[in-house]
Image: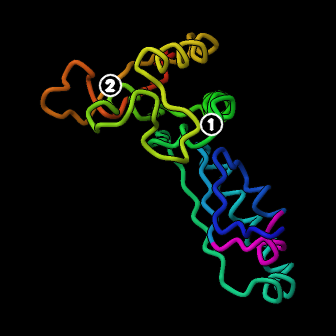
């Protein structure tokens, strides 16, 4: 592999099985930082114990293959925020990502944001031009609503969602905001 992977983020990591499996290859891959997130504190605690055991069992391999120390960060949380990132991957992958988060991680709150393509007018960009050259797509307000609606139909029993807009320039209030947010919240299904 020519390109080195410097950061590995595992959302819905459970007991850190992927991290433990890859640990002896981090040096070859170029991994310097691992960020693992899961909602289940018991699985995380189990994973940290197993990670420590794996590290000690493979200490010679790890020390000889890793030129730099690898920083591990493990988080438990019920809120997941994904800020202006979906437009950097193909739309089909963005759809799969959102579905995977809702199916696997099942956060209490998932905040997803992306540029409002219509607002590019306020920045003096031509009609079809994206804000950044690496954007694969940009949604209008209607397209974002339709895209999320199609995903959320499968999750209607468990989640509510709404749209918010931020970043307004005088004279462009009719476009609502430069950034559009989907705030996806798990329904309370208690007694």
Sort mark 1 into few (<14), some (14-19) or many (20+) by Cα contacts within 10 Å. many
Residues in magenta, as a range: 22-32
107 on left or right of 122: right
User: Outermost residue toward the front?
Assistant: 126
Residue 104: x and y, percent?
68, 34
Q: Which residue is mark 2?
A: 164
Q: Residue at x 73, y 56 (%)?
A: 16
Q: Overall secondary structure of the magenta stretch?
A: helix
Q: Nearer the viewer, mark 2 or mark 1?
A: 2
Q: Report, in whole angstroms, how far the alpha carbon at label 2 lies from the one at label 1.
A: 23 Å
In magenta segment, residue 82: no
Q: Which residue is mark 1?
A: 105
Residue 50: x and y, percent?
77, 64
Q: Residue at x 45, y 41 (%)?
A: 84
Q: Residue at x 70, y 48 (%)?
A: 14
Q: Nearer the viewer, residue 145 or 11?
A: 145
Mark 2 residue element: strand
Q: Quadrant of residue 150?
A: top right
């Amino acid at each position: 592999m020519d390109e080195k992977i410097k950061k590995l983020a595992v959302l819905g990591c459970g007991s850190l099985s992927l991290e433990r499996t890859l640990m002896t290859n981090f040096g070859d891959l170029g991994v310097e930082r691992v960020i693992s997130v899961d909602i289940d504190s018991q699985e995380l605690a189990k994973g940290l114990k197993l990670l420590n055991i794996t590290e000690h069992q493979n200490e010679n391999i790890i020390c000889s293959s890793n030129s730099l120390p690898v920083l591990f960060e493990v988080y438990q949380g019920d809120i997941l925020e994904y800020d202006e990132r979906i437009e950097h991957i193909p739309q089909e992958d963005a759809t799969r990502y959102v579905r995977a988060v809702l199916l696997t991680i099942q956060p209490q709150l998932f905040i997803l944001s992306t540029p409002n393509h219509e607002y590019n007018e306020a920045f003096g960009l031509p009609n079809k031009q994206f804000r950044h050259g690496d954007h694969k797509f940009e949604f209008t307000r209607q397209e974002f609503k339709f895209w999320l609606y199609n995903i959320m139909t499968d999750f209607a029993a468990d989640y509510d969602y709404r749209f918010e807009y931020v970043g307004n320039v005088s004279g462009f209030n009719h476009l609502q905001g430069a950034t559009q947010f989907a705030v996806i919240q798990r329904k309370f299904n208690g007694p």
